[in-house]
Image (cartoon, coloured by chain):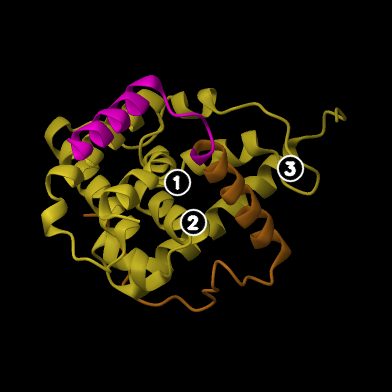
Amino acid sequence: MTKDSEDDDTGVESAQTSKNPKKDRISDALKQAYDDVANAPLPDRLSTLLEQLKVNREQ
Amino acid sequence: MSVEDDLLAQVTNLRAFARSLVRDESRADDLVQETILKAWSNLSTFKQGSNMRAWLFTILRNTFYSEMRKNRREVEDVDGHYAAQVSEKETQAGIMDLRDFNTAFSTLPADQREALTLVGASGFSYEEAAAVCGCAVGTMKSRVNRARVRLSAMLDEEAGSDDSGQP
C-alpha cells in the first residue's frame, strides 16, 4: 500500500472550484485528456463485445 | 434506462479511467473488457438506484490492482511508453500543451493519477472517489492536492526550459 498521509492537507481546494489559474489550467488539461479518450471511437473488440451483450440480453 | 443499458453506456468513461491507470492503450482496453464481463455477470449484485459508474470504476480498479499484484508489473511509465503514445493533436488556445501535460501526468504515482482523474475529470465528489478507492476522504483530498502540486511544479519547469523560441 502506498504510504499516504491520512491528513486532510491544508490548502486543499475543490478540484471543481479552484480559483488558482495554474490549477485551473491543470483542470482544463486533465479534462481534455480524459475527454479525448472517452470520445475516441471504440476499438472493434469492445464494439463487438457490446453488440454481443446486447444480443444476449434480447434473447 | 435499464441497468444493462446503464452499464453499456459507461464504457467510454471506463476507457478514460483505465487509461489513467494503464497507459498502454491495448492493456487498458483489456482491463475495460474484463470489467464489463465481470460487471455483466454480476449485475444481480448491483443495487438498483446506486451509482453504476462508481460500481464499475471500483471493479475496474480492483481488477487492475489484482492483476498488478499477480504480475508484478511496473506501475510507473519508466520508459515513457505512454507519453510516446499520447495524441499530438493541436490544443485549443488557453489550454496548456497536452503533450506536456500527459508526459507530466504519466510520471505521477498511480494513486495520484487515479485520484486526480476521478475527482478532476470523471466528476466524482471526494466522497465518491474515496469510496471507489477504498480510502478515507482526507486521503483522497491529500492525493489530489499532491498530484496538483507536483504537476504544477513539473509544468512550470517545462515552461521554463522551453526557450527555443519556437511557437
The amino acid beneath tag 2 is Ala
Residue at position x 76%, y 41% from top?
A: B92
Q: Secondary structure at mark 2?
A: helix
Query: In this figure, which residue is indicated by the disc labeled 2?
Result: B147
Q: Is residue B50 above or below residue B55?
A: below
3D distance between C-alphas at marks 3 and 2? 18 Å
Given contact means CB atoms under 8 Å apart, are the residues at marks 2 and 1 in contact? yes
Query: In this figure, which residue is indicated by the disc labeled 3?
Result: B159
Where residue B142 sits: x, y (%)? 41, 68
Whether callout 3 and callout 2 share a subunit is answered yes
- Mark earlier in primary sequence (3, 2): 2
Q: Residue furthest top?
A: A44
Q: In the figure, the yellow chain has which letter?
A: B
- Would you say the magenta stretch is mainly helix, strand or loop? helix
| Quadrant position of residue B27 | top left
10 Å crowding of disc 2: few (<14), some (14-19), many (20+): many
Query: In this figure, which residue is indicated by the disc labeled 1?
Result: B108
Chain at numbered mark 1? B
The amino acid beneath tag 1 is Leu
The amino acid beneath tag 3 is Ala
Residue at position x 55%, y 59% from top?
A: B149
Chain at numbered mark 2? B
Q: Secondary structure at mark 3?
A: helix
Q: Nearer the viewer, residue A9 or B3?
A: B3
Whether callout 2 and callout 1 share a subunit is answered yes
Chain at numbered mark 3? B
